[in-house]
């Protein structure tokens, strides 16, 4: 098992490695990321990085699973208002485009089909339960809760950094983002509303 930092200085270096490696993996993917660039930018060395994380794959895993937890915690689902959840996801992709890029690299390089992560690592139980409860209450259309969740997430990514049509940035005019939010909110509302 990799070592955990024992000192405050070690904790700062550990976090610096995570921050730098997040950008490296987001930009270059797993195969294209270079540990040499990470240690240089993080002002550390390979021995320390490998001591903390074990290897490049484990470093990616630490970052990737941390990003999944971040999305769950920063953008909690509200199944009674999936349209608002979609808009909040859109906003998070604008704030942290690296998070969606990490998921895309994991999809491209590790799991081209099926679930993005193994069942024990999936963090969607709460989301699926919330959607099922909203369906039972007549707030959300019938259907597999996973498919409803996947549809809403896909709609929220329409302008994400990995869109094959148009990748939005936070630097675009606020009114453009407001127009997209309104369109997204109304489209999701219509797509998931109970008949």
Image (cartoon, helix red, strand yellow):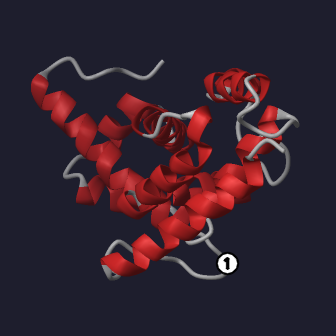
Residue 148 point in image, percent of width and height: 77, 43
In the rendered structure, the answer to whether residue 42 lies left or right of residue 103 reads: left
Residue pointed to by mark 1: 164
In the rendered structure, the answer to whether residue 137 lies left or right of residue 173 reads: right
Give me the residue at 88% from left, 37% from top.
143
Q: Choose top left, top right, bottom left or bottom right for residue 146.
A: top right
Residue 168 point in image, percent of width and height: 47, 76
State whether residue 110 appears in this view. Answer: no
Give the residue furthest to the right.
143
Residue 83 point in image, percent of width and height: 58, 50
Give me the residue at 51% from left, 72% from top.
180
Q: Which of 88 and 17 is in front in this view?
A: 88
Please, what secondary structure does the residue beneath circle 1 have?
loop
State whether residue 151 appears in this view. Answer: yes
Q: Choose top left, top right, bottom left or bottom right for residue 7.
A: top left
Q: Choose top left, top right, bottom left or bottom right for residue 29.
A: bottom right
Q: Nearer the viewer, residue 33 or 160?
A: 160
Q: Which of 41 and 68 is in front in this view?
A: 68
Residue 163 point in image, percent of width and height: 62, 73
Q: Residues within 10 Å of mark 1 (few under 14, many from 20)?
A: few
Give me the residue at 67% from left, 78% from top.
164
Give me the residue at 34% from left, 72% from top.
170
Which quarter of the rendering shows the C terminus?
A: top right
Residue 191 drawn above or below residue 171: above
* Count of labels in the image: 1
Residue 99 drawn above or below residue 53: below
In the rendered structure, the answer to whether residue 40 lies left or right of residue 72 reads: left
């Amino acid at each position: 098992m990799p070592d955990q930092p024992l000192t405050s200085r070690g904790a700062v270096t550990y976090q610096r490695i995570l921050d730098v490696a997040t950008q490296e993996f987001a930009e270059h993917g797993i195969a294209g990321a270079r540990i040499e660039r990470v240690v240089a930018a993080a002002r550390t060395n390979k021995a320390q990085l490998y001591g903390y994380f074990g290897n490049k794959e484990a470093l990616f895993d630490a970052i990737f699973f941390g990003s999944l937890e971040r999305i769950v915690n920063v953008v909690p689902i509200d199944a009674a208002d999936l349209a608002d959840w979609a808009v909040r996801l859109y906003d998070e992709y604008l704030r942290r485009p690296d998070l969606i890029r990490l998921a895309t690299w994991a999809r491209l390089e590790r799991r081209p089909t099926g679930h993005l992560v193994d069942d024990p690592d999936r963090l969607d139980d709460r989301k699926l339960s919330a959607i099922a409860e909203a369906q039972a209450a007549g707030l959300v259309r019938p259907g597999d809760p996973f498919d409803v969740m996947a549809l809403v997430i896909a709609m929220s990514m329409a302008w994400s950094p990995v869109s094959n049509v148009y990748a939005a940035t936070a630097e675009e005019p606020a009114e453009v983002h407001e127009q997209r939010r309104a369109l997204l909110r109304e489209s999701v509302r219509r797509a998931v509303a109970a008949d």
